[in-house]
Image (tube, coloured by chain):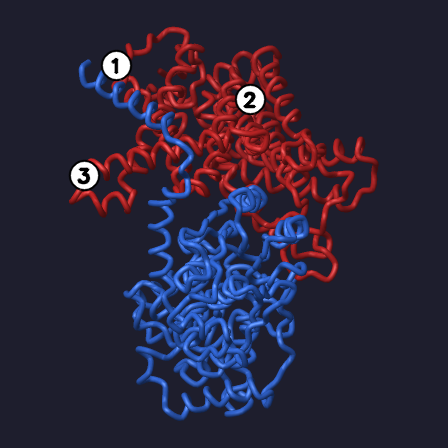
Amino acid sequence: MTDATSVDEAGATPPPDEGTPPPGGDQPDWLPRITGVGESVGRALLVPALALVLALFVGAIIIMVTDVDAWRIMGEDPLTALGQMLEGVGVAYRELFFGAFGSVRAISETLFTATPLILSGLAVAIGFRAGLFNIGARGQMFMGGLFAVWVALHVELPAVLHIPLAILASIIGGGLWGGLAGFLKARTGAHEVITTIMLNFVAAFLVLWALKTSVFQEEGSNLPQSARLAESARLPPIFGSEFRVSIALFIALGAVFFIQWLLFRSTLGFEFRAAGSSPRASTYAGMKVPLLYTAVMFISGALSGVAGATMTLGLPPYSVTSNFPGTIGFDAIALALLGRSHPYGVLWAGLLFGALTAGGRTMQAAAGVSVDLVIVMQSLIIIFIAAPELVRAVFRLKPIEEGPTQMTKGWGA
Amino acid sequence: MKTWMKLLAFLAAFAIVVAACGSDDDESTDAGEDAETTETTEATETTETTEATEETEATETTEGEAAGDFTPVKACFVTDDAGVDDRSFNALGWKGVNDAVTSGAAQPDPILLESTSEADYQPHVETCLAEGAEHIITSGFKLADTTGQFAEQNPDVQWTIIDFGSLGPNVTGLEYQTDEAAFAAGYLAAGVTETGVVAVYGGENIPTVSIFLDGFARGVNHHNEAKGTSVSVLGWDVDGQEGTMTGTFNPADPLVRATCESQIDEGADIILPVGGAINLPCGTAIQDRGIEGALIGVDADAFEAAPPEFQDLWLTSVLKGIDIQTQRSIEAHASGQPLGGASFVGNLENEAVGLAPFHSWEDRVSAELADETTQVLEDIKSGAITWEKFAVGG
């Protein structure tokens, strides 16, 4: 970054008419390293894979040192204690694996858990591609889910129309919520990190309030919980009602291919990426960058909104309570990083996190290892990815060759 | 290079261990769970006062020597998305399960399944069933739909749901008329306050939270009527059934402390925060400002359950015997007479709710006020004091 850029960043907000660069400058040059924008395919796969191996290794150490029973006999019989610790690790990881892939139910749970993760991960990834940090996936899930639930409760239609309409409502709800942050950035220069985080709170409280109103609440109930959704609006399960994975999975897969096409095969996607690399160059090239910011945030929000719909229309027992996004909105950021901001990468990352979450439940029950370990491992994976130098040092990899990544560095670099 | 060869070898060794491990799951229910158990027990080692006065058959067996009457059942406990360390109903329910293990009614190493989101409830309940649980305890109203559905599909399994009514012939509902004890706490607070202002706030306006606020506010009003005082209550509107809510049960959320501080700013010196650990930031606020204030704990006796640095702050606690009732429900099952099909409503009469001792505030509560408070408790029990009680159950 040259001084010129910094001055530009710190300077007064220029009036947002056409031809003027939007507020904020080019990306800082450390950003592509973390988000993976502009990376070669080989490297995009290698570092996350090695990060997973490292995280499993550190997780094993954590399981061992927290084995209270083994520590008790450590003084007298260290060998047995160590063996017991290793056995504990073995049982835990075996249950983690079988809980994720060991049965039809396990696979169903992995796919079910992965579905909203993939959708919201895509939402964050497309933001990264356009140089925007969308931290608001949680809020956008809330709004998308709320809109979908409204349609599910108050519109009467056959399922073939009801479900698409409810999904469309979630696209609008999430899209408007995300687009609002994009619009604020384009118009006023309000940083999207700040606005999306704040809009998360607004959305959460809005849902909390809405669930206490008669519009959503079951008659005669005073709990913050929606009435049962109409059967015609529930996403049909793929393998029968015993398993939770629903057609939402196909929606997520469709979204992956659509975003792949949008980003890398369409003009709009090219403009998104160009705006992400250098808003000023894009402006000089005649692109309407403020409009692009709003559009990309709308699409990002819409993807999160659909994720919210899958957690309401697709979550038995189909009665919505106040925390339906869970931690997905934040996991999405981790997923986009792990997937190197690439739609296919996000798909695999979503499946991995889905498997870890589903397997973690079984691990908790059968091996007695706290489910928190899964969260620790997910976090470790992200830390290792955010510090690729560390992974390379551990595994003695060659430093990356600069080259094609050049374009993602700002003009000021 | 050598080091990393060793590392790889170590990893390979791991892989072999992982592959070699047979199917001896049950033995190794270990570390994480044990650690949590200890912690929870520590956090909620309370309500002995209530327990001591219990007169039910099952409890007598507990306190007696042998566990001979019990056929130990395999228990499985599912928390709601607040997790087991919520210093509230999840923690107390899990303590109850472990107490049942101690009394011999539940098999050792009960299963604990902590939910982190609503998507966890169904798979957790399914896991309980897959692991062969005979008694499944689901914690909180959020699990009601899932519990009702699976209880119907699995009539041979006994279920206990905390903070909700019975959902079928094999489901025991545990509900608590906590406003009875909160009423007495309100009366006490109105007698203790120096500023003439007391306050309440909750996590969310849900029945299990609001019931405390409602009872407390009515207790203050009762003091005003009976003694001609004019103590005002912040944070709850008895007529509108609305009040001050933080919107979160996460004590780290800055909004929690801000809520408490704004009430202190309005002159409140006795505060009842309801919702897990959201009372702790308020304790810190009182300490930081150096005011002569007090808090009222909920669920367990906070003097014992909360971190020791807050010990001077607890005027009393509104006790809610979730642990005792959970234990009793499992014991009833283990003795061959499951309580399923009925809702147990805990109140002052059956001593499942109550008021904790004043502990460090003993000196600052006049003997007269202490006697009056006891009398209020008696009057509520006998029905001499009565009001439109808060409706429990979904």
Q: Is residue A159 left or right of residue B330?
A: right
Give, as a three-letter code, the residue at label 3.
Pro
Real-space CA distance between mark 2 and mark 1, rounded to the nearest whole angstrom: 41 Å
Real-space CA distance between mark 2 and mark 3, rounded to the nearest whole angstrom: 64 Å
Relative to A26, is B45 above or below? below
Residue B361: name its quadrant. Answer: bottom left
Residue A206 on image: x %, y %: 61, 50
Q: Colour of chain B?
A: blue
Find disc 2 in the rendering and name its residue. Answer: A289
Relative to B135, is A49 above or below? above
> Which residue is found at the position 39% from the left and 68% from the top?
B66
Find disc 1 in the rendering and name its residue. Answer: A396
Among the two numbered marks 2 and 3 on one chain, the one whose residue lies closer to the N terminus = 3
Question: What secondary structure is found at the residue carrying circle 1?
Answer: loop
Among the two numbered marks 1 and 3 on one chain, the one whose residue lies closer to the N terminus = 3
Residue B393 on image: x %, y %: 63, 65
Give, as a three-letter code, the residue at label 2.
Val
Farthest front residue?
B68
Quadrant housing the N terminus of chain B:
top left
Quadrant housing the C terminus of chain B:
bottom right
The chain coloured red carries which letter?
A
Q: Mark 2 or 1, which is nearer the eye?
A: 1
Question: What secondary structure is found at the residue carrying circle 2?
Answer: helix
